[in-house]
Image (cartoon, rainbow, N blue to C red):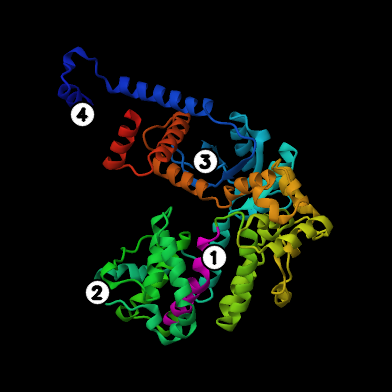
Amino acid sequence: MFIIPPILLAVGINIEDITLSYRTIQRTRMLLRKDIAQGLKDNFKTHDKYVVHWDGKMLNDISGSRFVDRLPVLLTAFGTEQLLGVPKINTGTAENQVAAILSTLAEWGIVPYIKAMCFDTTAVNTGIHNGTCKEIEKTIGKDLIWLPCRHHIFEIILKSAFEVYWPVSSGPNVSMFGRFKKSWDQIDKSRYKSGIEDTVVSDIVSNKKNELSRFITQRLQLLQPRDDYKELLELSLIFLGEMPRDKVSFKRPGAVHHARWMAKAIYSIKMFIFRDELQLSKKDFHGLQQFCVFIVVLYLKAWFSSTSATTAANHDLQFLKALIDYKRTNPLISSATCEKMILHLWYLSDELAILSLFDETVPCDIKKNIVEAVKTSEGQDSKSRRFLIDKNNLNSFTQKKIYDFVSKKSLNLFKTFDLPYDFLDIDIELWPTNESYNENKEYFEQLKVVNDAAERAVALVTEYNQCLTKNEEQFQFLLQIVKEHRQKYRNCNKENYLQYKCKNIL
C-alpha cells in the first residue's frame, strides 16, 4: 500500500478513481499464487525416467509454535529440476516419509515414471528391512535404482578425518573454530603464510603441487554452485602458495557448527594460514597441519569430482585405493577414512559399477573386460545394495579393477531405466556412432547422484517458514513459485533483468 499509490501517480493514474485495499491485494496474490502453481503442474513435461529426491528439516509449524518435520520432494531428469511439494510430517520416521513422498508423487501423477531415488545415507533411508527406500519399493511394487548422495558420503569421510584430532563433542559447535571466529578482527590479514612454507607440509605436498594447482585453477574457472565451494578452492591455492598476494582476500568466518561440513575444511585451512597470528597448542597445530594436508592432497579432488554419475564407480575405487595408500603419510587418517569409505561403496555395486562404460577416463581394454564380466560373472552373493568388503583385508582390494565389480546383475540398470543395451554386442570401437550407446551416455551424464537439489529446497523452506502466509496450501504454492522464479532468474540484478527483457522484446 505504500508502494502502489506512488507508482500509479507516477504513470499518471488518479488514485481517487482506484479502489485500494490491502485485503484486496492479499486476496489477489493468493489467487495468483494458486493459478501460477497450478500452471506449473499443468505444464509439467512428463518424462518416463525420473529420479526422486528428498531431505528433511525440523522447523516451527507455520501456523503455531510446535515443531514439525518438513520433507521437500523433488524430481530430476534430463538436466531439469522440479519441486513437487514440501509436506509436513509429525516425525521423520521411515513410515511417515514414505507416506509423504508417495502422496506427493501421486498428486502429480508420476509414480509409474520413477526409476531411481537419490537420498542422504542416513539409517532411516538406507535400512535394508524398513528403511524409507526399501519401503517405497515395497509400496509401489518394483525395484528402483538407489543413488545415495555422493556429497553426503564425502562429508562423512571429511568428518572422520577431522575427528582423528578433534573427537566429536556433545555441543553443536567446534570450540577451536569458535575462538578463531572471535579473534578474527584482531588478526592482521596481511600476515598470512602459505601452508607449503611449513617444512612438514612441503615434504608431503611439493612433488604434487603442480598437479594440485592445475586442478584447482581449472575448477575456479567453472561456475561454483555455492560460495563456500569457491572459498575452499581459493584457500587451497593460497595454502599451496600459488595465489598472487595482490589478489588475496579472506572472508569473515561464518557458522562453525558440526552440521556445516564444509566449514571444517575452510576453517582449518584458514587457521593454518594464520598460524603465526594465533596461539595454537602443539596438539592443535599438529592436527591442523595433518588435516589440511589431507584436504589439499586427497579430499579436494575427490569432493569436486564426485558429482558425475558416469565416473562415480571408478572414482570411488581409485579414491579408496588412495586412502589405503595414505597410511604411508598418515596411518591415523588412513585408518579412520577407510573405515568409513568401505561402508559407502554404493557405486561399486553390480547395478552402478557398469556406469564406467560411459566414463571417458576408463581405457577401452578395461571396458572390454567390463562387457565380458556382464556376460559371464555371477557377482556378489548379497542382498545389500552396496559392495561389501572386509576391513581386515584392505590390501587385497588395491589389486582390484573396475570390471571386478560388474556382473550379469548389472543389466538391471538398463532394464530399470528402460534403456537399450544392445550396444554391448557390438565392437567397442563402434560405440561412439551407435544410437543405443549414445542414448545411454546422454542420459547417464545428466543423472543426478548428489542430493543438492533437496538441500536447496530445505534452505528455501527455512527462508520462507512463518513468512507471508499461515495457510498450508498457500505455503506450498509460494515455495513452488519462488523455486521456479529462482531457476528462471539465477542472478537477480538489474543488468541481467534488462538483458532478459530485451531478449523477450526482440
The amino acid sitting under disc 1 is Ala
Residue denoted by label 3? 81
State the separation of the CA atoms marked 2 and 1.
33 Å
The percent coordinates of residue 244 (x first, y second) are 30, 72
Whether residue 76 is in magenta: the answer is no
Whether residue 297 is in magenta: the answer is yes
- In the displayed structure, 193 sits above or below 88; it is below
Q: Magenta stretch: dominant SS? A: helix
| Whether residue 257 can be seen here | no
Q: Residues within 10 Å of mark 3 (few under 14, many from 20)?
A: some
The residue located at (38%, 60%) in the rendering is 255
State the separation of the CA atoms marked 4 and 1.
52 Å
- Nearer to us: label 2 or label 3: 3
Residue denoted by label 2? 188
The residue located at (47%, 41%) in the rendering is 66
Q: Earlier in the sequence, mark 2 or mark 3?
A: 3
**Looking at the rendering, in which quadrant would you find the C terminus?**
top left
Q: Tell me which segment is drawn in magenta.
A: 285-306
Query: Closest to the observer: 293 or 159?
Result: 293
State the separation of the CA atoms marked 4 and 3.
36 Å
